[in-house]
């Protein structure tokens, strides 16, 4: 009645059923192991210890400012509704509690409560450690002692109205690049320095006459002398010498600025170091 393929399928089904029945019989025939209850007292002690730590942590009082006691905080601390209400009314009048005695006078708490909780009061620094306030003196009224700007520190530069950390840092960086200022024009060229700030800077700092450098004659200067000028590099010096030779010496600054890559915008500063004669 069945072909060979169907017969094979029936045979496999019988085998699978036989395996399932065998597993079922085997599992039921196993002897059940008796449940052994171990001593859990040690674990219980650990659980109880953790619970006690959690309760202690929850009830721990941290330092707080009594001016900001909320309803919940007051309930935890043991304040009555009347005491909390007095505190809130006092704070609503824009007044402050600055000592534990003030707190008791405002709220009417008992001495016992105050002795147990007041050690946790934390008032602002200006209350607990008052210091003499320095009277503010406007910049215009401050006594100014002029100083050599080439020896000024960054903090001394920052004392000038209008000069902050960034600007003072740029002034010092420019000073190091120039190996010292020889004229206030160089200071004015620092990025971010305004005319009004420059006026204040001149009140605090100066450049001594000893810093003034003897100017170099461009038409007679050697390459090393020209390289000593902070605004020049090797390429520009070579081009200047080449143009000087071709022109048999520079007759005017108009011819000098025609030199390749000459920083014409710094001509006024370069003239502090150079002369044509």
Image (tube, rainbow, N blue to C red):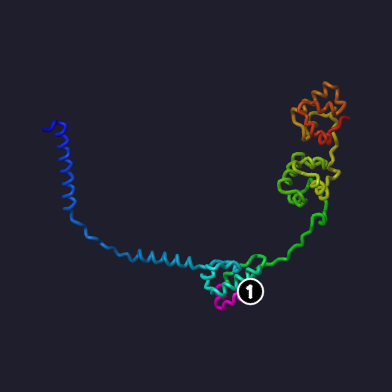
Q: Disc 1 designates what residue?
A: 102
Snapshot quadrant of residue 238: top right
Residue 174 vs residue 10, the one in the foreground: 10
Residue 24, above or below 98: above
Picture coordinates of residue 267 (x, y %)? 81, 33
Residue 83 vs residue 229, the one in the foreground: 83
Q: Is residue 40 left or right of residue 13?
A: right
Picture coordinates of residue 135 (x, y %)? 77, 62
Picture coordinates of residue 134 (x, y %)? 75, 62
User: Which residue is located at x 84 percent, y 22 percent?
Assistant: 247
Image quarter in which the C terminus is found: top right
User: Which residue is located at x 16 percent, y 46 percent?
Assistant: 21
Q: Does 24 appear in magenta?
A: no
Residue 257, above or below 99: above
Residue 150, above or below 104: above
Picture coordinates of residue 84 (x, y %)? 57, 72
Snapshot quadrant of residue 228: top right
Which segment did they paint magenta? 102-117
Q: Does 116 appear in magenta?
A: yes
Image quarter in which the N terminus is found: top left
| Residue at the farthest bottom position | 111
Main SS type for the magenta part?
Answer: helix
């Amino acid at each position: 009645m069945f072909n060979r393929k169907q017969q094979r399928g029936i045979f496999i089904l019988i085998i699978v059923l036989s395996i399932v029945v065998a597993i079922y019989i085997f599992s039921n025939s196993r002897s059940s192991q008796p449940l052994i209850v171990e001593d859990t007292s040690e674990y219980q002690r650990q659980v109880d210890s953790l619970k006690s730590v959690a309760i202690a942590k929850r009830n721990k009082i941290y330092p707080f400012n009594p001016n900001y006691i909320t309803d919940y905080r007051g309930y935890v601390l043991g304040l009555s509704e009347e005491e909390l209400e007095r505190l809130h009314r006092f704070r609503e009048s824009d007044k402050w509690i600055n000592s534990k005695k003030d707190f008791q006078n405002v709220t009417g708490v008992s001495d016992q409560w105050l002795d147990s909780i007041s050690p946790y009061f934390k008032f602002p620094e200006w209350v607990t450690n008052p210091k003499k306030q320095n009277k503010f003196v406007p910049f215009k009224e401050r006594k100014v002692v002029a100083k050599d700007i080439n020896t000024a520190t960054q903090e001394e530069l920052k004392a000038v109205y209008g000069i902050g950390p960034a600007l003072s840092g740029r002034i010092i960086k420019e000073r190091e690049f120039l190996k010292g200022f020889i004229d206030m024009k160089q200071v004015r060229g620092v990025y971010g320095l305004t005319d009004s700030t420059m006026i204040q800077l001149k009140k605090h700092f100066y450049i001594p006459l000893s810093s003034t450098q003897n100017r170099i004659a461009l038409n007679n200067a050697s390459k090393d002398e020209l390289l000593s000028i902070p605004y020049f590099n090797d390429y520009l010096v070579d081009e200047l010498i080449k143009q000087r030779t071709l022109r048999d010496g520079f007759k005017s600054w108009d011819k000098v600025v025609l030199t390749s890559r000459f920083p014409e915008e710094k001509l006024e500063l370069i003239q502090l170091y150079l002369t044509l004669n």
